[in-house]
């Protein structure tokens, strides 16, 4: 039975990699209700652990392009940008008033390892 679980887990990890997910960190690297900034494929993302659930969003606030979302404080299911107080839903990325949201990135957790899917930046020459 354990061999089958290992095979299934291994297949799941291979599928995640094929789908563009990259390893980010282990859950214990994150503190509850405190954001952390990561850079993947030249994209800054803010990652939060709220009630053991993991959320990944763009780290850049659309208000004045400040890169401080990771440093915002968590209020209910929202993160508040520390620069100007805009609130964004951690699940949807939408602003509390419904406009100018943040990009949300898909997250998978396997054996306490966090994987995030971040598409590479498009280069515009």
Image: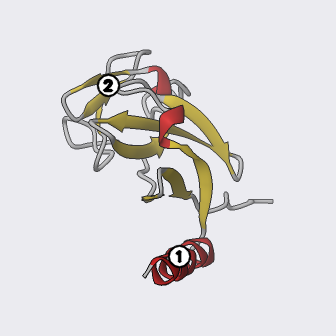
Q: Is residue 92 left or right of residue 55?
A: left
Q: Quadrant of the C terminus?
A: bottom right
Q: Earlier in the sequence, mark 2 or mark 1?
A: 1
Of residue 116 and residue 92, the one placed in the foreground of this image is 116
Q: Position of residue 117 (x, y in %)?
A: 54, 61
Q: Is residue 45 visible?
A: yes
Whole-number angstrom distance, CA of label 2 to CA of label 1? 44 Å
Q: Residues within 10 Å of mark 2 (few under 14, many from 20)?
A: many
Residue 65 position, x and y percent, is 53, 30
Secondary structure found at label 1 = helix
Above/below status of 105 relative to 50: below
- Along the line of sight, the residue nearer the viewer: 101 or 56: 56
The quarter holding residue 50 reads: top left
Q: Point out the frontmost of discs 2 and 1.
A: 1
Classify residue 23 by image quadrant.
bottom right
> At numbered mark 2, what does the secondary structure look like: helix, strand or loop?
loop
Up-down relation of residue 8 to residue 45 (above or below): below
Question: Which labelled disc corresponds to residue 86?
Answer: 2
Which residue in the protein does label 1 denote? 6
Q: Is residue 101 visible?
A: no
Percent position of residue 54, x then y: 38, 45
**Residue plotted at (26% across, 36% down):** 51
Residues 34 and 78: in front is 34
The residue lying at 43 percent from left, 50 percent from top is 103
Quarter holding residue 62: top left
């Amino acid at each position: 039975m354990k061999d089958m679980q290992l095979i299934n887990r291994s297949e799941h990890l291979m599928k995640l990699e094929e789908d563009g997910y990259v390893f980010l960190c282990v859950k214990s690297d994150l503190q509850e209700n405190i954001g952390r900034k990561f850079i993947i494929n030249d994209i800054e993302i803010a990652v939060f652990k709220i009630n053991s659930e993991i959320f990944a969003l763009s780290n850049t606030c659309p208000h004045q392009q400040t890169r401080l979302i990771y440093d915002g404080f968590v209020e209910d299911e929202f993160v508040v940008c520390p620069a100007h107080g805009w609130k964004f839903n951690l699940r949807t990325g939408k602003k509390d008033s419904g406009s100018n949201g943040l990009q949300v990135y898909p997250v998978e957790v396997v054996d306490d390892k966090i994987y995030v899917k971040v598409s590479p930046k498009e280069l515009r020459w």
